[in-house]
Image (cartoon, rainbow, N blue to C red):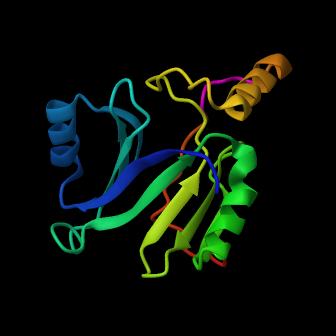
Amino acid sequence: MVLTYGLTHVAIAVRDLARSVRFYQEVFGAQVVYRDEGFVQLQTPGARDVIVLEKDPERAGPGGGIAHFGFRLMSPDDSAAARRAVEAAGGTIRQEGEFVPGEPYLFALDPDGYEVEIWYELPTPVDPPAPSLAPSFSSARQSRAASGSSSERPSRRQPAIRRNANDP
């Protein structure tokens, strides 16, 4: 078993990015934490949840709009344990790596073929305080602070571009 913050994000295909961003901002107070061509991440204040909007009109809507769901690791050091847990439970690793330095991820298929992302994300400005039950998360943050590393997060990624480990 690997400790996570639980189900943390949903990635949905949308027809119109601006319209979808506006909806989630107005209904839930979501804030844009990353934006790229064809891709926006929103986060609700005071929580670690992320709503990923991927412009993909052909897949948008009921029955086909969910691209994947993800679980956020408490420590970047837990990535290898997550891989082992996925494989031990009958899942298949599709892709793994780092989105940016310090943000390891993997995409896996569960036994039914649903895509699950397991990743560690550097803190964002709208994250709540880290829970006290996660010493490895706190230790990682303290290590970065002690080494003079910035706690500000680098530019994010667009997972819709690369889905296979063999893609350039």
Residue 31 occupies quadrant: top left
Identify which residue is drawn at 76% across, 21% down. Answer: 142
Residue 118 higher or lower than 103, as above or below? below
Residue at far right of view? 147
Identify which residue is drawn at 62% across, 40% down. Answer: 74
Residue 68 higher or lower than 165, as above or below? above
The image shows residue 147 at horizontal and vertical percentages of 85, 22
The image shows residue 23 at horizontal and vertical percentages of 15, 40
Give the side of residue 113 with respect to residue 77, left or right: left
Q: Quadrant of the C terminus?
A: bottom right
Give the side of residue 24 with respect to residue 52, left or right: left
Which residues, given as a range, are shown in magenta? 149-153
Identify which residue is drawn at 71% across, 29% down. Answer: 135
Front-most of 21 and 51? Answer: 51
Secondary structure mostly seen in the magenta stretch: loop
Task: Residue 152: say if magenta.
Answer: yes
Task: Residue 97: say if magenta.
Answer: no
Give the side of residue 144 with respect to residue 46, left or right: right
Front-most of 39 and 98? Answer: 98
